[in-house]
Amino acid sequence: MATHSIDYDFPSIEPRWQSFWAENKAFKAEDSSPKPKYYALDMFPYPSGAGLHIGHPEGYTATDIMCRYKRACGYNVLHPIGWDAFGLPAEQHAVKTGTHPATNTEANVTNFRRQIKALGFSYDWDREINTTDPEYYRWTQWIFLQLFKRGLAYVDKRPVWWCPALKTVLANEEVVDGKSERGNHPVERRALRQWVLRITAYADRLLADLEGLDWPDSTKRMQAAWIGRSEGAEVDFILDDHSLGNLTVFTTRPDTLFGATYMVIAPEHPLVDKLTIASQRGAIAAYRQQAAAKSDLERTDLAKDKSGVFSGAFAINPINGQKLPIWVADYVLMGYGTGAIMAVPAHDERDYEFAQKYDIPIVQVIEPLDSSSDREGGPDLPYSGDGKLVNSDGYSGLPWQEAKQRMTAALADKDRAKATVNFRLRDWIFSRQRYWGEPIPIVWVDKAGYESAVAAGASDLPKDPVTFEEDGLISYALPVPDQALPLALPEVESYLPSDSGESPLANAQAWLDIWFNPLTGASHSATEEPPIDSTWLRGRRETNTMPQWAGSCWYYLRYMDPKNSEAIASRSNLEYWRTPDLYIGGAEHAVLHLLYARFWHKVLFDVGVLPYDEPFQKLFHQGIILGEDGEKMSKSGGNVVSPDTIIESHGADTLRLYLMFLGPLEAKKPWNPRGIEGVHRFLQKVWRGLINEHGKMHSRIKASPNSESADFTKLLHETIKKVTEDIENMRFNTAISQMMIYANALLKSEVVTHTSAKAFVQLLAPFAPHVAEELWVKLGGNAPVQAAAWPGYDEKLLENETQKLVVQVNGKRRGELILPKNIEESEALVAAQKDKIIMSHMEGKTLRRVIYVPGRILNIVVAS
RNA sequence: GCCCGGGUGGCGGAAUUGGUAGACGCAGCAGACUCAAAAUCUGCCGCCGCAAGGCGUGUCGGUUCGAUUCCGACCCCGGGUACCA
């Protein structure tokens, strides 16, 4: 190379400024400040072995732009990052290799940290957290104990999704189409002892408080649907055989009681055995067995074909005394409502289908308001729309909503019904039979042990003891006291589940079976001498660990005070930082993480730890980035783009810029490997526009304030306005377009004032911070650039003296005129009539009407 | 099936409150520079047409002086969900 020009040299610029920021702690957040605060939160990553995915830096760049912009606007910014590092892949790796999952996790974290730092995000690294750090999970355990103490955690043996391949239990939400969400392995139902969190106790608040949140509507709707509130009534049907008592059903439409022609109970319903008459016993038993054997996959596959068996028993309709046959059918689920329904085939699609199949009568009791929609021979059934009652003695003619209230009230008076609310939301199965999770800080003791602990004054006990019965023995749950936390994971020889189906922790004998002091949490192995002090109890530790959701349920709180050893965070920090002002993450967490975190947050609010009862006021989902082929990026698809490769070839600034330039942040968009050249060229243009071949300030930059053209000054102010507004509205793609327009003009401009050049570099800085920092210093500024106040624009400079007016004839564009501002309609019309082309479209026609929108349009309506 | 989201040039996308459709970028074409290439710069770039002009934002219809934007019906693509009584 003959030339010695110093061009845009990103490989040297980027690491240099990253070191500068780190050494100067440029992004340190102050825990109190006269400045207004701004807290921007990224969904923290699971540090997988595969390294950073291109989707991570997309959302992270967006929050980083907001943070750098807010700092320049004078905010005290909290922008933290950490690691959601418990999880299945590390455990599976440990099972395979025998190395401790912590070792592998640490290596992955190191790699992730390197990759994230290479992107130049303005994180306050002093606040980095890791959910697997005992000093972190100590507080996860502490929060669990708050739930336990308040009666929100209990133990139950219940059928759960067991994945033989993963050797673990999965939450409902982790099972997709009868396969595990992770790994896509088949799953089956198994009854196992589980810790369950009573999230249903918060269902009403979780639903109601959605309203005030600045979240995408679709996400709010998804949560609302997941919670699934429905208002109705529980209605008691007396059984024909009075000795059997009542059958209680839940219905949202008690107004259709007169249309009930049969009843259905779930195959798992406790009354099935008692109800069934002798001659039906065989058929029912066979049906129940069949239903139990069906995996959920089969149940859904067969969803369209309803099946059932008549039990032989009857129930009495409380509204009219009619005898209704009781069927056993698996389209009624034991887990919802009361596990029994009254079937109204005329007004429910499922009941209709079933009634058709088994020749059960269909009685219409709701008539559409507009009865003209009736076909010949009656309306289309099943009908579930609006309407008024028919065939309902004493209620016919009423709108169904009113009938629903009246009939519920009438039956309630006779003690046969009560208005109730049902939720689709289930309690949250919170335990996993895994090693690599937070140990649940519970010790199981016998009844005498529990009573002696109570007598000794053990704290944090729930009002009613949490117990579990197995093989006739009842165990009582005692919490490990706060001062003994964290309850650390013990070392184990094998990371495979124990033979009993318990987690690998069940094999850590010395840790598991202990002498335990319920007041201090002190313990030692049961194989050692029993203590002399009689408050010590013989106990067995809980072997379940917490699910990965646990650590991510409250991490945004820990960032506010990550090293606090007295509390999850100090009260003053919690009150100062409140909650994140912006939370960006993928839409795949719309229900699970976001619902669980809201639940914990509300509990902590009730405990009195938090000053606010909702965690995430403003939420935004970045769209996913697809591969070049328009398909989801995947290793098997061979379309994965690695941030490392792009940083090496084009630099972090280019990558950040391109991720934002691809399209709107929320949109799903394909990666185009050639498109990146465009934004890279843009940065080179900016460089060449401001820096000469010797690496010094370009000669077009002049100190004198009025040396550049008025048009160019105006463009700068337009750019400041556009970029500022676009950042505020998170429309980063159009902000970049505007900066490109400016850069193109810069290269054509002979003169740019020093002030203009610096202002433009400030605009660029949130997007491409390294090159902006370099330019800023070369223009004589002091690093970091974010310390300089964000540039403002002058409205007056944005105004035009002339205006462009588009002229239409009959709504079609026929020309445009440059006219003085504030021109009258009549003058504009005169000007238009001087235009030959416009006139040619009006010749020989009569003027009918003129529409004039000043500054925009003149539409001349003519007719022949 | 139901619930969401989305259909704009060859491609990613832009378009304020109903007021010039296609900003910006990619790709492409032509030219300048060069022995040549790369890089860079200049110009062109929705479709049909020599032009005048016509057509054009998934389709059909409506409202309006004027519709990518509002209303109605439909088609297609993507995501979520699955008997929730």
Image (cartoon, rainbow, N blue to C red):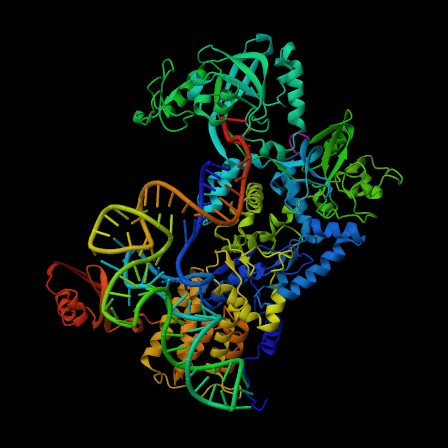
Q: Quadrant of the C terminus of chain A?
A: bottom left
Toward which corner of the image does residue A309 lie, by quadrant?
Answer: top right
Of residue A784 and residue A663, the one placed in the foreground of this image is: A663
What is the span of residues highlighted in magenta in the rendered image? A461-465
Where A855 sits versus A103, above or below?
below
Specify the principal SS of the magenta part.
Answer: loop
Residue A33 visible in the shown view: no
Q: Quadrant of the N terminus of chain A?
A: bottom right
Of residue A41 and residue A638, the one placed in the foreground of this image is: A638
Residue under the point 61% across and 78% down: A12
Where A215 sits versus B22, above or below?
above
Residue A283 visible in the shown view: yes
Toward which corner of the image does residue A754 lie, by quadrant?
Answer: bottom left
Toward which corner of the image does residue A507 lie, by quadrant?
Answer: top right
Was residue A201 drawn as part of the magenta stretch in this picture?
no
Residue under the point 31% across and 25% down: A371
Residue under the point 43% across and 20% down: A256
Image coords of residue A255 (percent x, y): 42, 21
Image coords of residue A554 (percent x, y): 60, 49
Image coords of residue B72 (percent x, y): 32, 41
Image coords of residue B31 (percent x, y): 41, 84
Where A120 sits versus A503, above or below?
below
